[in-house]
């Protein structure tokens, strides 16, 4: 324990700030997992994007990696402003408000989530020992965010929360890339951002088709249809 | 340690105890006033809790025919538990005489002791409301306690000790450092203290509606000075929890020495922080709707999970590297 105390003040302030951002990302991931209302879910997603943008900016500032500023800017435009706006419009046009229905009840989901966090931390331990960045200890948290978003996609039966889960998973991946290697090359980052955008458009079209066909956004109807065919 | 060194510590301890006893109803009055203001009602006088206490102390306590001695002893026990708890928490200074006597775990035990006695007293008369309230209180208690312990463990792992004075010393008087784990622990602690003090999302301290009341249901049979002691103890509990929250999460300004100057600054800072905390509590109470009793396990379960996460995050982010 004394060894910890003596190493703690050695961490630079930027590193502490990034650690704080990582913790808040994890907190938001859990909040999304426990959220029942769809409008709050979208708001939480926007907030997670904002924290991601902030942490990317801090990494850019403290390491002098200029292309990370662009990543932060793309994150801000895409994940904090554009995607939540599109999602909100979609929810309004589909007129779903209390649409969050879970397959397992929420306390159980949270317990599974804790288990996932422990797994993620253990898996990330050897990776973070290899990485040489100041942000390496946050790899475990980024992995946990990805797994929690996965869990959210699995446990939600409606389409919109599943899509939010997908977007949030991308947030986690992006965070993992930033913390492990100071971000991917610009081309890849742009490609991923474009993919998410296109994905959103495709999902939007899908929502309307699903609802037209089944009179509901519940994915279980689609599964039943597939089974009968 | 010789007697000359002990004397100022003893004086500081006494001062802190009496300050807690005197200020606790004021904090309750302050929260009630802000609650009324935020809800658009005319606020009650700030000193109303003192008048209520005086009025109740002047009245004759009435006892049911089948009340046992436990019913009569319980208010004194609960009051002394809460007074001791308020004395252990490092409110003004971390150099306290009682500090080595009880650590964070003993503090949780003190709260548990008070809870057991108030629940037993609630069931003692045998009315339906009393046992209903007691059962609900125990439900909330057994869910809130592990979460509270995990919050304390987070702070203990950071500072390497379960003694509250050492924790405050580590957090307040070392080099400034951001602890992300404390953010989790802070959210968990807020949820636990809302539940433990019977505040709005879990219980409403101003209600006498039989479907929703928890704390009020247990003390329905009390009157006179017994009721006064229980009300005072409830204020003390709120005060102790607020001071705990301040000591763990905003400890800046708690005196390390026992000089009158340092203590005066600590008192001023503490009053300011408590005023702000009371306002925030009233804000939370106004903004949230009372939830069903059966939703409280979920609420407190989340608090526990957040506290567990706090420990995990500490081990990962701030741990050995």
Image (tube, helix red, strand yellow):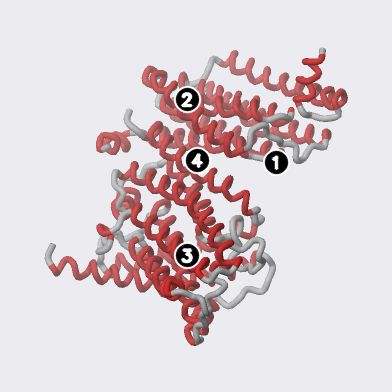
Instruction: Name the chain under label 4.
Output: B
Q: Which residue is mark 2?
A: A120
- B223 on left or right of A34: left
Label 1 packing within 10 angstroms: few (<14), some (14-19), many (20+): some
Q: What is the number of the mark on residue B54?
A: none
At 54% from the left edge and 14% from the top edge, which residue is drawn?
A185
Who is closer to the viewer here, B5 or B77?
B77
At 38% from the left edge and 34% from the top edge, which residue is drawn?
B315
Q: Label 3, label 2: how many angstroms apart (C-alpha)?
A: 45 Å
The residue tagged with tag 3: helix, strand or loop?
helix
Label 4 packing within 10 angstroms: few (<14), some (14-19), many (20+): many
Question: Do the dots labelled 1 and 4 sit on one chain?
Answer: no
Q: Quadrant of the N terminus of chain A?
A: top left
Q: Nearer the viewer, mark 3 or mark 2?
A: 3
Q: Nearer the viewer, mark 3 or mark 1?
A: 3
Question: Do the dots labelled 3 and 2 sit on one chain?
Answer: no
User: N-terminal of the two: label 2 or label 1?
Assistant: 1
Q: Which residue is mark 1?
A: A37
Give the answer, above or below, for where B103 lies relative to B274: above
Q: Nearer the viewer, mark 1 or mark 4?
A: 4
The residue tagged with tag 1: helix, strand or loop?
loop
Q: Position of residue B214 (x, y in %)?
A: 58, 62
């Amino acid at each position: 324990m004394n060894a910890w105390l003596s190493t703690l003040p050695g961490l630079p302030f930027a590193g502490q700030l990034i650690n704080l951002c990582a913790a808040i990302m994890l907190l938001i991931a859990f909040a999304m997992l426990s959220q029942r209302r769809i409008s709050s879910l979208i708001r939480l997603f926007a907030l997670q994007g904002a924290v991601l943008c902030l942490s990317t900016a801090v990494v850019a500032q403290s390491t002098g990696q200029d292309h990370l500023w662009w990543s932060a800017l793309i994150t801000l435009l895409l994940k904090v402003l554009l995607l939540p706006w599109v999602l909100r419009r979609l929810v309004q046009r589909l007129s779903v408000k209390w649409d969050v229905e879970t397959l397992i009840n929420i306390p159980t989901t949270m317990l599974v989530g804790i288990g996932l966090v422990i797994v993620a931390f253990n898996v990330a331990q050897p990776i973070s020992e290899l990485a040489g960045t100041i942000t390496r200890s946050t790899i475990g948290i980024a992995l946990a965010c990805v797994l929690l978003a996965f869990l959210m996609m699995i446990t939600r039966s409606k389409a919109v929360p599943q899509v939010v889960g997908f977007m949030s998973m991308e947030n986690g991946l992006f965070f993992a890339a930033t913390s492990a290697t100071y971000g991917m090359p610009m081309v890849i980052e742009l490609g991923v951002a474009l993919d998410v955008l296109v994905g959103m458009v495709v999902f939007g079209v899908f929502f309307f088709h699903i609802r037209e066909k089944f009179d509901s956004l519940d994915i279980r109807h689609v599964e039943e249809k597939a089974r009968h065919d | 340690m010789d007697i000359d060194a002990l004397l100022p510590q003893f004086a500081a301890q006494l001062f802190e105890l009496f300050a807690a006893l005197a200020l606790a109803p004021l904090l309750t009055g302050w929260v009630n006033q802000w609650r009324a203001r935020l809800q658009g009602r005319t606020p009650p006088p700030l000193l109303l809790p003192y008048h209520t206490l005086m009025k109740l102390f002047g009245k004759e306590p009435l006892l049911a025919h089948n009340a046992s001695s436990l019913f009569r002893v319980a208010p004194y026990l609960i009051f002394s538990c809460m007074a001791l708890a308020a004395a252990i928490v490092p409110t003004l200074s971390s150099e306290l005489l009682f500090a080595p006597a009880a650590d964070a775990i003993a503090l949780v035990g003190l709260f548990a002791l008070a809870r057991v006695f108030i629940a037993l007293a609630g069931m003692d008369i045998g009315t339906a409301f009393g046992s209903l309230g007691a059962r609900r209180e125990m439900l909330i208690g057994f869910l809130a306690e592990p979460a509270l312990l995990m919050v304390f463990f987070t702070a203990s792992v950071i500072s390497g000790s379960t003694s509250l004075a050492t924790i405050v010393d580590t957090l307040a008087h070392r080099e400034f450092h951001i602890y992300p784990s404390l953010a989790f622990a802070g959210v968990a602690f807020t949820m636990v203290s809302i539940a433990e003090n019977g505040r709005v999302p879990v219980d409403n301290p101003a209600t006498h509606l039989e479907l929703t009341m928890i704390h009020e249901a247990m003390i329905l049979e009390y009157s006179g000075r017994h009721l006064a002691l229980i009300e005072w103890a409830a204020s003390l509990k709120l005060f102790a929890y607020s001071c705990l929250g301040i000591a763990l999460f905003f400890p800046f300004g708690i005196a390390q020495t026992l000089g009158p100057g340092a203590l005066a600054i600590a008192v001023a800072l503490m009053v300011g922080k408590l005023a702000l905390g009371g306002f925030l509590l009233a804000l939370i109470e106004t903004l949230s709707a009372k939830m069903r009793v059966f939703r409280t396990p979920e609420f407190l379960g989340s608090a526990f999970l957040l506290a567990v996460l706090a420990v995990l995050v500490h081990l990962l982010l701030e741990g050995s590297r």
